[in-house]
Amino acid sequence: MKKRSSKDLRELHDEELNATLLEAKMTLTKLRFQHIVGQLHDTSHLSIIKKDIARMNMILHDRKLQLKLK
């Protein structure tokens, strides 16, 4: 699983970014469940997804702050 770059995420519109964020959260939930059950062989996917989610939240937060400043 490859991490998403900030540059690529910043090019997305808000709706697309929210949809991607929702998809990433659902994927994280599935991976956590697989990890608990013992079916997840590569646990590095968990940290990659967590960082992607944090990156998307940061971009959305930055956009909200920019709108307030205008």
Image (cartoon, grey):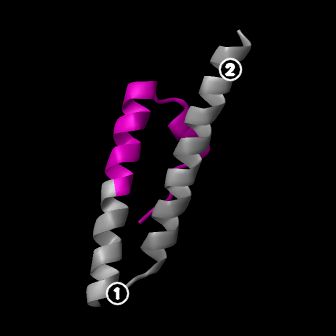
The residue drawn where x is 65% and y is 31% is 62
Quarter containing the C terminus: top right
Q: Residue furthest front?
A: 68
User: Where is residue 23 drawn, in percent x and y?
Assistant: 32, 49
Residue at numbered disc 1: 41
Report, in whole angstroms, how far the alpha carbon at label 1 lies from the one at label 2: 41 Å
| Identity, as a three-letter code, of the amino acid under mark 1 | His
Q: Is residue 45 above or below residue 7?
A: below
Residue toward you, 42 or 69: 69
Q: Is residue 8 visible?
A: yes
The residue drawn where x is 53% and y is 44% is 56
Q: Is residue 40 visible?
A: no
User: Where is residue 51 drawn, in percent x and y?
Assistant: 56, 59
Residue 13 lies in the magenta-colored region: yes
Q: Which callout, 1 or 2, points to the residue nearer the camera?
A: 2
Query: Which region shows up in magenta?
Result: 1-25
Residue at numbered disc 2: 66
Is 7 on the left-hand or right-hand side of 46? right
Is 65 on the left-hand or right-hand side of 3? right
Checking the image for residue 58, the label placed there is none
Q: Based on the displayed image, in which of its 4 quarters is residue 30 positioned? A: bottom left
User: Where is residue 25 drawn, in percent x and y?
Assistant: 37, 55
